[in-house]
Image (tube, coloured by chain):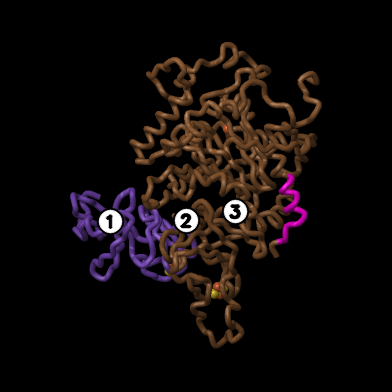
Amino acid sequence: MSDREFKRVASLADIPRGQTYCITAGDVEILLCHAAEGVFAVANLCTHAAARMSEGKLRGCRILCPLHGAAFDVRSGAVLSRPAREALRSYPVKVEGDDIYIALAE
Amino acid sequence: MSATNNPTPGEARAPGPSVADTLRRDSREVPAPLLEQHYAFLGDEDLPVERYISREFFQREIERLWPNAWQWACREEHLPETGDSYVYDIGPYSVLIARMDDGGVKAFLNVCTHRGTRLIDAQGCAYTPSITCPFHGWSWNLDGSVRNIPGQWDFPHTVGDSHNLAAVRCEVWGGFIFINLNPEAAPLADYLGVMPAHFAQFPLERRRIRAHVQKTLPANWKIAQEAFMEAYHNFETHDSPHGANAQYDVFSKYVSRFIHTIGSYSPTALADYPGDKWRSPPMSEQEMLADLSIEGRSLAAGETARQVAAQAIREQLQAQLGVDIDRCSDSQVLDSIEYHLFPNMFFFPGILIPMVYRFRPNGDDVDSSIFDVLVLEPLPDGAAHPEPPEPTRLGVEQSYTEAPELGWLAPVYDEDTGNLDLQTRGLKTSRKGLSLGNYQEVRIRRVHQTLDEFMDQGKPFR
Ligand code: FES
Ligand code: FES
Ligand SMILES: [Fe+2]
């Protein structure tokens, strides 16, 4: 993890607890999710039929897809319910003071 | 034994001070409902074992009981905003409850009206601003009306509300959203009976969910809930003197109650319990106070452990939560006051013991159930409901102590649920039915008698 390149992508002040915030890095949309357990970053497009998770809702550690209701765990991206079958890609996050950094490369 | 049997069944009571005697010494005015007594003898025949272990009985419950019983699905605060929804499953049935634009809630069968696909898979909180079936993409508005049918040209026969989501009866009481799968069910109020009046001073809608733990239990849902319907087990199961002189009330076919006092008990009620513990000598008031976790406070002459403990809790609630319960009786502050609502729900108006329970069958497994415990903490006047916690889910082998949010209750629930597997296995090797105490176990009998009515007269789901 240490040699990964972290990029500052947002300010903590942009994302009240319980809310999400969508950023774009190149042509990828990434959703920052501020849960009680911390800030997590997952791909913004649902693995089922590409609905935007930013139009869904964060409930605890679950992000709910607005289209067919699939749920994912924002901590890992793991899929929790159908109809999705694949996890959302998840990105490492660092919070330093008010700054949120994520690592984009593998 | 016959010497101690009363000739009129159901008339005998535990010797020594009763709950009513304890309530008379309360430091505050005791709300009238807590002073009511409502017992009637309901018979003393054994309950056949099959009611708990047979697949046919279980299947008939699925067909006749669950589709006709009012049951709470979730709390209002589980779906605070327009588009929020909640999925509640009972046996094979699944219900979707949605928050409308106008702030009201509606419930629907969680099933597509095209070819029957389940709409939302996972139980619990969901978000369905425009619910869409994953199969062919039919979609509906929040009120269940059709929003769009892709390739509408092929479905000229979907007219008017013919393909709206199927409405499910839905009513709210005490902050709980209740559903009933029978469109012709009598109103919830008929079912609740005395409960709205009894809870008027203890409004459950003004409570927040402090903890929610959902555990799988290795027993039929009735075995599991019946472990919580009497306080007769307290001595052996919990190593506690409280409960041997509890009060039991049956208010209607659907509603029953026990009150078992905390911080006072009847030593003489323990006369024929094994050993001398708590009887000879009885616990002193000072020891009782320590038992209530209040250390380093000496009782003055005339003070009772109950009064001092209740006052300490009032002050703690004021300091920690900003909730004023100065007028609350010692009984409401301390005691285990448990209302049961047929078939599977429990509500406690208390402060120290403020839970809500629900016991459901686990899928189609006769010998397994899902037990929800909610700890409901009073909300300060005017405060909005915070977001409710996601339930902590525990498997059969896990201990309640793995849910630290339960605090002192966790080891108690481990004790309560520790006998369930033994009872399930025991019943399978029993030729004899289950015997019930005429008084202390009357609530269990009431549930079975009402259950029989549903099994005979309940409208089959289909
Ligand atoms: S697009 Fe997310 S569940 Fe279908
Ligand atoms: S089964 Fe739901 S759209 Fe076809
Ligand atoms: Fe118990």
Q: Amino acid at mark 1?
A: Pro
How far is the residue under mark 3 from the one under mark 2? 14 Å
Q: Is residue B111 on the magenta stretch?
A: no
Please give left or right for residue B257 compared with residue B292 in the image: right
Nearest to the observer: residue B294 or residue B274:
B294
**Residues marked 3 and 2 touching at CB (< 8 Å):** no
Residue B427 point in image, percent of width and height: 72, 36
How far is the residue under mark 1 from the one under mark 3? 35 Å
Residue at 73%, 27% in the rendered image: B12
Mark 2 — residue?
A: B76
How far is the residue under mark 2 from the one under mark 1? 23 Å
Q: Which chain is brown?
A: B
Callout 3: few (<14), some (14-19), or many (20+) C-alpha neighbours within 10 Å?
Answer: many
Q: Quadrant of ligand 1?
A: bottom left
Which chain hosts label 3? B
Q: Which chain is purple?
A: A
Q: Main secondary structure of the magenta part?
A: helix
Instruction: Find residue B342 and name its label.
Output: none
Tell me the quadrant of the picture where the N terminus of chain B can be found: top right
Mark 3 — residue?
A: B71
Residue B184 appears in which quarter of the rendering? bottom right
Residue A81 point in image, percent of width and height: 48, 59
Q: Looking at this view, name the residue that lies furthest to the top.
A: B281
Instruction: Find residue A16 and name its label.
Output: 1
Q: Looking at this view, name the residue that lies furthest to the front.
A: B29
Q: Amino acid at mark 2?
A: Glu
Vertical comparison of B161 with B71: above or below: below
In this rendering, the count of numbered labels is 3
Please give left or right for residue B147 compared with residue B236 in the image: left
Q: Which residues are magenta?
A: B449-460
Nearest to the observer: residue B259 or residue B326:
B326
**Residues marked 1 and 3 touching at CB (< 8 Å):** no
